[in-house]
Amino acid sequence: MEDLKNLVSEKPAQPAAKPIKEKHIVREYAESILIAVLLALVIRTFIVQAFKIPSGSMEDTLAIGDHILVNKFIYGSKIPFTGGNRVMKFRDPRQGDVIVFEYPEDPSKDFIKRVVGTPGDTVEVKDKRVYVNGKLYANPHEIHKELDTIPRELQPRDNKDPVKVPPGSYFVMGDNRDRSYDSRFWGFVSMDKIKGLAFIKYWSWDKDKFRVRFGSIGKLID
């Protein structure tokens, strides 16, 4: 009887619980970071990229310390490692567009200027005034901060002989005409060097007055 009691009082053996397989927390964080980095690279390469204005060549349109966004797909997004091939092109750069491009004489540097002449246009500068195809091109954003006029024999800032813009290239100038190093000095910008169209200021910091330029934040660039 004792043996029977012991047998009855014993609980039936429970099946061993299967261990739940969970991802290690480090792996989860690593995957999230990797996805975020890939998305950021795609956005930066094909859609929009942020730039900071380091000089006053585009004053008063853009001030030193302005942070801007550049539309990278409007002219067609460049496919990396293909020699400048583009996809999803909406239109070509137009006169008046403010563009960011690789400086032709040093591609490691990015410049920002306004398109003045498009392929086939003839551009000339006479006494600080710009003529395109024989007609005065007076952009409402241009400013002049120097009173002197430099003869063409010395440099082309204020006087430049007519030049015809070649196919696939653009003649660009800074809005701060007297203090801009642009196509008057070093020539044309080829389409394969253009990164995109500047379209909005998302932040602006005045380092001289140590303050935020709240009036500039969210302002469209025209």
Image (cartoon, rainbow, N blue to C red):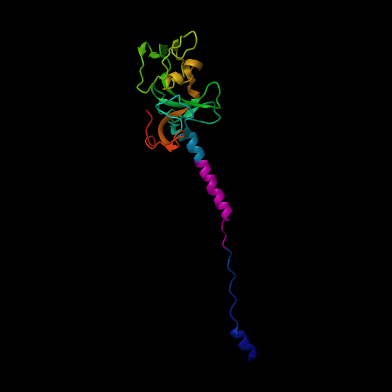
Tell me residue 125's x, y (percent): 42, 12
Residue furthest to the bottom in view is 1
Residue at x-position 58% and y-position 52% = 27
In the figure, residue 61 lies in which quadrant? top left
Q: Is residue 194 visible?
A: no
Q: Viewer-proximal residue, 35 or 102?
A: 102
Quadrant the N terminus occupies: bottom right
Residue at x-position 58% and y-position 74% = 14
Tell me residue 47's x, y (percent): 45, 35
Residue at x-position 50% and y-position 24% = 193
Tell me residue 115's x, y (percent): 42, 21
In the figure, residue 161 lies in which quadrant? top left
Q: Viewer-proximal residue, 149 or 198?
A: 149
Tell me residue 149's x, y (percent): 43, 12
Q: Is residue 36 visible?
A: yes
Residue furthest to the top in view is 153
38 within the magenta span: yes
Please identify the dominant SS of the magenta region: helix
Q: Which residues are magenta?
A: 20-39
210 within the magenta span: no
In the figure, residue 172 lies in which quadrant? top left
